[in-house]
Amino acid sequence: MTAPRPPAFGNGDLVTVRAANPPTHYRTPAYVQGKTGRVVALCGVYPDPESLAHGGDGHPHKPLYRVEFPQTALWDNYPGPPGDRLQVDIYEHWLEPAA
Amino acid sequence: MSENHDHANNPDHHHDHGDHTHPGMDTEELGWHARRVQAMETLLAEKGLLTVAEVQRNVDAVESRSPADGARVVARAWSDPQFKARLLAEPEAALAGMGYQLPDPTPKLDVVENTAAVHHLVVCTLCSCYPRALLGRPPDWYKSFAYRSRAVSDPRGVLQEFGTEIPADAEVVVLDSTADLRYLVLPQRPAGAEGLSEDELAALVTRDSMIGVSQPLTPELVAADD
């Protein structure tokens, strides 16, 4: 049982969601994979769902961030105004600093 | 059985517990998924990983909650600015003060406020995450593939189908609750609701307004209904 590392990202950081399809029960929707957004909140540190769902103990626990994307960055033909946004909760190991 | 099996909070729960048979619950009448769940529950209980009583307690906890509980919370926030500030900053403490215990440690609950400038809408694209600890079970449409896919890519189109028009100069923010948090929308208090009691305010708060797909009722609408 290792102590979790301190969160790698802070509010306002630009992050890119990793694109991957591991054979686990992961909680990262495909439509944000490869997209770049902004961290708007650290939601806490939680047992890793990809471990829990396969009989593991959830360690090491993972920081969870609320990441915000402009809708126009997610969809080519987003039908609404440019201020519309989407927020989704993403675990740290799915995030990389934006290039 | 009925004296320790109180369904007073759930008027939809009518089935007879007098002889403790559950109509429609004979194994032969169950569908494939229900039989599978029942088999898993039996196995988990036989292996000592959980007890049937624990399962029943969890079922009862969800069934004892309904949108009326969320409406009480929203009405309190509309009438008490200090409570509202606490609900937004420390939702679990604020809810505990009203007698609502959330699951420990997760899922956590967060409250987002709708204003004239920002309108929030909640969806779970991966499954059907929903603030069950406060609102009970989600409506069927919330779990539908159509809602889960379109709420993220065309939220204003979905809102229009619910009769909700958000002005173009206001922002629509979709919350996709895919992980350890559940979201409750604190809707905008309708105009004309000044001076109403908490009970009268709660009557304006619909389930859909706490998901963010519609606005709460107006006092005029409720009066016209009476």
Image: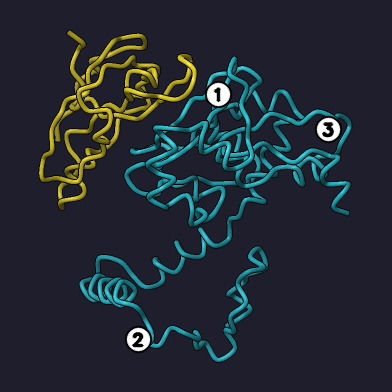
Say which of marks 2 and 1 sits in front. Answer: 2
Q: CA distance from mark 3 to mark 1?
A: 24 Å
For this rendering, which residue is in front, B40 or A86?
A86
Mark 3 touching mark 1, by CB under 8 A? no
Residue B159 % position (x, y): 56, 36
Disc 2 target residue: B27
- Under circle 3, the secondary element is loop
Position of the N terminus of chain B, as image quadrant, is bottom right
Sequence-wise, which precedes: disc 2 or disc 1?
A: 2
Q: Position of residue B207 (x, y in %)?
A: 62, 47
For badge 3, the amino acid type reads Ala
Question: Disc 3 sits on a residue from what chain?
Answer: B
Q: Which residue is mark 3?
A: B193
Secondary structure of the residue carrying tag 2 is: helix
Which quadrant, please, contains the C terminus of chain B? bottom right
Which circle's residue, 3 or 1, is located before the other in the chain? Answer: 1
Q: Could you say which is closer to the camera, residue A43 or residue B26?
A: B26
Mark 3 neighbour class, 10 Å CA radius: few under 14, some 14 to 19, many 20 or more: some
Task: Name the tint of chain B in the rendering.
Answer: cyan
Labels 3, 1: one chain: yes
Q: Which residue is mark 1?
A: B89
Answer yes or no: is residue A1 visible.
yes
Say which element carries label 1: helix
Q: CA distance from mark 2 to mark 1?
A: 47 Å
Residue at 34 percent across and 30 percent down: it is A89
For the colour yellow, the matching chain is A
Do the residues under discs 3 and 2 have CB atoms within 8 angstroms? Answer: no
**Mark 3 → mark 2, Cα distance in angstroms:** 51 Å
Query: Residue B152's image quarter?
Result: top left
